[in-house]
Image (cartoon, rainbow, N blue to C red):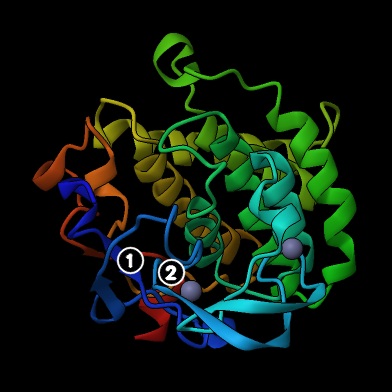
């Protein structure tokens, strides 16, 4: 195995459904060579004699299988080979998770989600929509919103950050805010909220400096959106209180110590401040 994979961090995915906060203490050093190990957590696969009925991590359909990882994750063949946008929509439409950062990081482990790429624009909006509607107990709203978010996110070209001065992760938070407030170009307060949302995310992303990193910008955008929703809509999106990037060693342009997520940092949202 290549050296680069040997000391990669990953989030602990034990009891993932109940997982609420991304704590530095829960992040373990482990390989992320998903070509051989579990797609979700990187652990070794276990080949059993007898088949078990188990739910696919992404689509939540049940299957008979001999192969599970040590943490009992299973990904069906269809989900394993799904393109990025479909994988995001499939997982988010079925997931009951309420932490948008957790949703985003789980999705980033799917093999179709590259280190950098325009699929992150949809990933940001989808993670936030999922967490929002699961938090407000309106999960049935998700499928139509995810479908609309995907259409809008596909209009944001790759490289928009450096060529147009408008990072697609920030626009993803604007799409999210537009959808949950039902904004249109003729709306008044909703128009203000969705443009302010993008502005806040873009400000945070810009101050982190280049070169572009779709992981860093996704984290920053989701943190800004969680704070914004808490402050303006009084909906408490739980992001956890700390985050360390599990992907830094896969990024050739990683800023390392210059990025606050490299060694881990506290997450500063007003909701987190209120909780402590
Ligand atoms: Zn696993
Ligand atoms: Zn599946």
Q: Residue at x 86, y 55 (%)?
A: 143
Q: How many labels does the image show?
A: 2
Kindly identify which numbered label has been placed on residue 42. Answer: none
Query: Is the CB–ligand 1 distance for label 2 below 8 Å?
Result: yes
Measured as percent of width and height from the top left, residue 36 is found at 42, 58
> Cα distance, mark 1 to mark 2?
7 Å
Disc 1: CA contacts within 10 A as few (<14), some (14-19) or many (>=20): many
- In the image, is 33 to the left or to the right of 103? left
Whether the residues at callouts 1 and 2 have beta carbons within 8 Å, the answer is yes
In terms of secondary structure, where does tag 2 sit?
A: loop
Specify the farthest residue to the front.
Answer: 49
Q: Vertical placement of 248 versus 90: above or below?
A: above
Measured as percent of width and height from the top left, residue 221 is found at 47, 46
Query: Is the CB–ligand 1 distance for label 1 below 8 Å?
Result: no
Q: Vertical placement of 68 versus 40: above or below?
A: below
Q: Residue at x 41, y 38 (%)?
A: 115
Measured as percent of width and height from the top left, residue 184 is found at 84, 33
* N-term-proximal mark, 1 vs 2: 1
Nearer to the camera, 91 or 174: 91
Q: Where is mark 1, residue-wise? A: 10
- In the image, is 55 to the left or to the right of 185? left
Measured as percent of width and height from the top left, residue 88 is found at 67, 50
- In the image, is 68 to the left or to the right of 269? right
Q: Where is mark 2, residue-wise? A: 41
**Quadrant assignment, res 173:** top right
Specify the farthest residue to the left.
Answer: 257
- In the image, is 5 to the left or to the right of 3? right
């Amino acid at each position: 195995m290549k050296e680069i994979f040997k000391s990669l961090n990953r989030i602990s995915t034990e009891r993932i459904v109940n997982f609420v906060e991304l704590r530095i203490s829960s992040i373990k050093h482990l390989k992320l060579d998903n070509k051989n190990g579990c797609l979700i957590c990187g652990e070794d696969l276990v080949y059993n004699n007898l088949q078990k009925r188990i739910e696919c991590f992404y689509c939540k359909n049940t299957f008979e299988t001999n192969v599970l990882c040590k943490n009992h994750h299973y990904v069906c063949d269809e989900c394993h080979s799904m393109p990025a946008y479909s994988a995001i929509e499939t997982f988010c439409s079925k997931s009951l998770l309420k932490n948008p950062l957790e949703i985003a990081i789980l999705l980033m482990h799917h093999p179709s989600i590259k280190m950098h790429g325009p699929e992150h624009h949809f990933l940001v909006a989808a993670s936030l929509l999922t967490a929002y509607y699961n938090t407000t107990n309106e999960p049935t709203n998700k499928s139509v919103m995810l479908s609309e978010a995907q259409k809008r996110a596909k209009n944001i070209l790759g490289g928009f950050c450096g060529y147009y001065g408008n990072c697609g992760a920030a626009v993803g938070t604007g799409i999210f805010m537009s959808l949950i407030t039902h904004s249109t170009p003729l709306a008044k307060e909703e128009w203000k909220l969705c443009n302010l949302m993008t502005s806040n995310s873009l400000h945070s992303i810009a101050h982190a400096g280049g070169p572009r990193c779709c992981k860093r910008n996704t984290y920053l955008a989701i943190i800004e959106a969680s704070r914004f929703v808490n402050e303006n809509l009084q909906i408490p999106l739980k992001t956890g209180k700390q985050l360390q990037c599990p992907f830094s060693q896969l990024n050739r342009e990683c800023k390392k110590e210059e990025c606050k997520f490299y060694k881990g940092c506290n997450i500063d949202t007003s909701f987190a401040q209120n909780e402590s």
